[in-house]
Amino acid sequence: MTKMMASQAFWAGLPRDIACVAVIGAGAMGGGIAAQFANAGLKVILLDMPGPEGDAPDAPAQAGLARQVRIQGFMGPTGPGRVVTGNTVRDLPLLAEADWIVEAVIERLDVKRDLYARIDVLRKPGSIVSSNTSTLLHSQLVEGMSDAFRRDFLITHFFNPPRLMPLLEIVSTPETDPALLQRARQAARQVLGKTVIDCRDTPGFVANRIGCFWMAAAALLAREHGLTVEEADAVHQAMGMPRTGVFGLFDLIGIDLVPQVWRSLVDGLPATDRFHRYDIAADPLFRTLADQGRFGRKSGGGFFRKTEAGLEASDLASGAWRPTVPVAPDDLPGGGKDLAALLADPGRHGGYARAVLGEVVAYAADHAPRIAADPSDVDAGMRLGYAWRQGPFLLADRWGLGRVAAHLHAAGLPIPALLTQATEKGGFYRDGHFLAAPVAGAGREVPLTAAGLRAQGRTILGNGSASLLDTGDGLGLLQVHTKMNSLHPEVLDVIEETLPLLGKRLRGLVIGNDDPRAFSAGADLRFILSLIKGGRRAELEAFIDRGQRLFLGLRHAPVPVVAAVHGFALGGGCELALHADRILAHAEAHMGLPEVLVGLIPAWGGCTSLLARGLQAGLAPDDAAHRAAATIFSASQSGSAEQALAAGILLPQDRLVMNRDLLLASAHRMTLQLAQGYAPPTRQVLTLPQGLDLSDLAAEGSDYDRQMLRGLARVLGGGGSRSEAENMAVERQVLFDLIDRPETRARMEHMLGTGKPLRN
């Protein structure tokens, strides 16, 4: 099996209803969309206009591909190789192979319609055709097209950058083929990892309709309420909408977009729409900034700019630059953390917060039923598209719907019907379910979560640090729930109580959690340092010994164990995952063994597991040991699951999940499959290289770095063979040799005190 074939197996668990995708337009969005499809293991055809005379015919498409490599639109080294570049004059017949054709060309109706006519005669029947437009309507795009094309056409509005932004808006019409729509939704969710919201064919769709209204209202209301840009952004940060604040967000996305995006929305909406009240495209300040080329970060300054003298801000009345006046959280009502106190404040800050939130809630409640198939998608759109911590309807519940209605009445605004319905039902939400519309969320798959299992009373055992939950079908979920899911003795208590249940009460085990940040950030470093400084050597030795024994117990359990890895899986957390039969990794998992940064080596089987994985992958002992040492000594963490595969942390038989929401459910299914006729793995005997030379890894390192490398050479080399347990005993010996050195304590204290490693 070639290396490419072996690595391709890693993607084998993803659905394959879509095998080949064509993207037309290799700009920032088109190139990013192509990269994300390639990240999912699909073949991608990327086309653009032919290059200028004298350039390569495919130069624009190749430039788009190169840009995605440069900005890390690809998750790993194999993605670019899945993309075939071409041009729209010579290579358009390649579209006949595509199951999905995505158009991402200039926002001009004539250009798009001409392209669609050419696509329609070349594409295979039933292929999905979609546009990434953010400003044009579905009805405009398909005008004059064939009935078959109209049935197979969608708008799929990606957010930038496509790799990192989870939101995808899909616009269909009643004439859209329902089966094709469902196929696109499923592929978007499972293959691209997107959260899909269904939008009506209305200007701005959902997220941009509400988001652009919020930004415009927030900007103009700040001036009306006499706030500075710093104060307005601080109020928004206190409300969690978003960390940049509104003026910081304008600078981030570019004020040059105002004439295009905001003007198109105002022009496309009836005169009665409240969007016209906040027409920033006609506002003198915004027009002045655009005319002066003050577009934001891309031009060196918009509402804020950095100078040699420090950060400066724009005056909202004149636009003139002035030194910034920072606003600390304590300068706001409630210390910037209490929404109720902020909204109750009688001063300028509270008045501004009420005005902005009242406008957005009223606008969202008035328009949600007409722009979204599910009104609760307004909240999803603002969270995922505009980085709000909570959407406007959930914020309204926190404010109190009676207070919202009173504010709207005082402001002379009508009470939307959806707000009235929510008030009658006691809120927009109850127990996480949207109540204001009876069909909200109908037919959607409810993700498997630890919180959901807890709410159902499915806890088998646990303590304040970890729990074992019953997921059904005879399987258990081992959930760590400490800060960053770090591992300390109480977590090991739960693992120890779980092991006797494997093969008796449970026929399989998933290790995972709901935390958006981490599978596990590793062993609790503060706890370890407290044992070292307290002279509690025996207690520390028992902690390390116990972790080794329990992790080996998981590896050789009589039932399958699957680690559902996402976010950070570092140090001991990575070692925990390495002892599972399979790792099901979210595509954006960050895995690594950074122990050398605090003067240690992995000693819960990390060294042993990486060596074993290299040998399982068919590497010679020297190569397997050297790769393991390089991965450990670099202390790096993968930027994705694919990078973890390239580093040997993951194996081809492990699997990838693109959508974080599907991780635990997918791990549950994988464990059930493995449980059919399961036999524990044979206890591996490791073949060790003789005279392992790691000097190339520390050419510029310190004396202490070379000391750690000598320790790694003891664990990974020495010739002969060892069992896993015997090799882990050597890990333990080397670990305690390092712990006894003062440099280790210095590195640990520095890391805990500063959050940064003390190395070289």
Image (cartoon, rainbow, N blue to C red):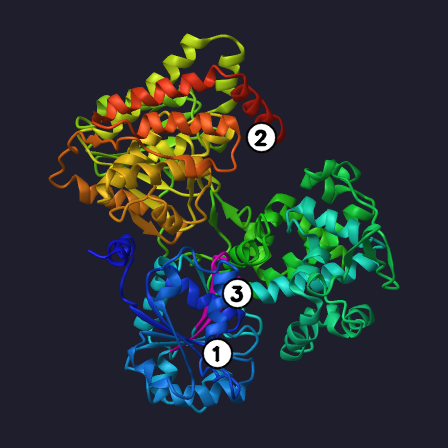
For residue 190, which quarter of the picture? bottom left
Q: Which mark is residue 165?
A: none
Residue 461 place in picture, x, y as percent: 33, 23
Disc 1 residue crowd, few under 14, some 14–19, many 20+, Cα 10 Å: some
Q: Are marks 1 and 3 in contact (CB under 8 Å)?
A: no
* Label 1 sits on residue: 59
How many callouts does the rendering have? 3
Is label 2 in a helix, a strand or a loop? loop
**Residue at (36% x, 37% y) in the render:** 512
* Label 2 sits on residue: 758
Q: Earlier in the sequence, mark 1 or mark 3?
A: 1
- Give whichever of 561, 433 is nearer the camera: 561
The amino acid type, in three-letter code, at marker 2 is Leu
For residue 631, which quarter of the picture? top left
The quarter of the rendered structure image containing the N terminus is bottom left
Residue 702 place in picture, x, y as percent: 53, 30
Residue 621 place in picture, x, y as percent: 25, 37
What distance separates the C-alpha of mark 2 from that of mark 1? Answer: 45 Å
- Give whichever of 618, 540 is nearer the camera: 618
Q: State which region is magenta.
A: 153-171
**Residue at (28% x, 52% y) in the render:** 10
**In the image, is 392 to the left or to the right of 569?**
right
* Label 3 sits on residue: 369
Where 580 falls versus 282 (above or below)?
above
Is label 3 in a helix, a strand or a loop? helix
